[in-house]
Image: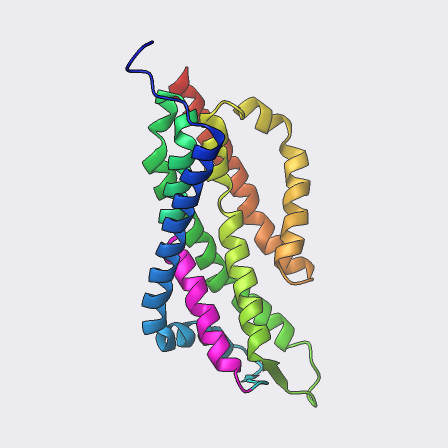
Amino acid sequence: MNPEKPKEMGFLEHLEELRWRLVKVLGAIVVGSAISFGYIDEILNLLLYPTKNTTNPISLQVLSVQGMFLIKWFISFISGFIIALPVFIYQFWKFVAPGLKINEKKYALPVVFFSFTSFIIGVSFGYYILIPFSLEFFSGIGSGHVENNFSIQYYFSFLTWLMLGAGLIFQLPVVSLLLSAIGLLTPPFMRHYRRHSIVVIMILSSFITPPDPVSMLIMAFPLILLYELSIGVSWLVNREKS
């Protein structure tokens, strides 16, 4: 038996490793949430800022006694998740790394950096582009006799859905990098199914954005660019492997 060959782990050992990696991720989220809660007022002011720049005034209301308390904890948790995202990506990669080849393991740090950066860009796109446009669009639909009084719980749910949805969708180049690294994706395959992918992108955009065609197109345009970028990422990975 070759002493240098790593010992294969059994099923229970894989479960134990997964458990400890999940514990580390949850610990990172707890720490990130605690840090976020210390700056919760500043974070809330930042998230409420888009409501102050619409043509039609928007008023937010708390409709339950414990409303603001729950919102602060909810926003702290979401912020903690974003802070802990690099830890989550790294722990996921370390869990699957033993099953990868040596030349595939070198993508660990690029994947962590690329994924976190793509997520932040997606969240920023949602905050600076999608949310202001959506608020402007929906606040202007009502008649002059109806005030825009929105539930603050619904506003933050709406905000979170758009920002996190955009952040996850912007992971497309990262998925391309991972699948190309393990040999499941090639540039010819992606070019062949480009039209099919555009249809899927349109469907995803309709789910993430509010139900109007303009918002859907605003979301779909960068996704199509990301798909083309993903083809380039796949080409670079496959060129290095050849």
| Foreground of the two, 226 or 84 | 84
**Numbered-mark total:** 0
The span picked out in magenta is 65-84
Image location of residue 99, percent across then percent down: 43, 25
Q: Is residue 53 visible?
A: no
Image location of residue 34, percent across then percent down: 34, 67
The image quadrant that residue 133 belongs to is bottom right
Image position of 17 with respect to 27: above or below: above
Magenta stretch holds residue 122 = no
Say left or right for 20 vs 227: left
Quadrant into which the C terminus falls: top left
- Residue placed furthest toward the bottom: 145
Image location of residue 85, percent across then percent down: 40, 51
Say left or right for 12 vs 221: left
Main secondary structure found in the magenta portion: helix
Query: Which residue is located at x 59 percent, y 67 percent?
Result: 134
Q: Is residue 199 visible?
A: yes
Image location of residue 21, percent across then percent down: 39, 44
Image position of 150 with respect to 35: above or below: below
Query: Which residue is located at x 62 percent, y 83 percent?
Result: 148
The image quadrant that residue 192 belongs to is top right
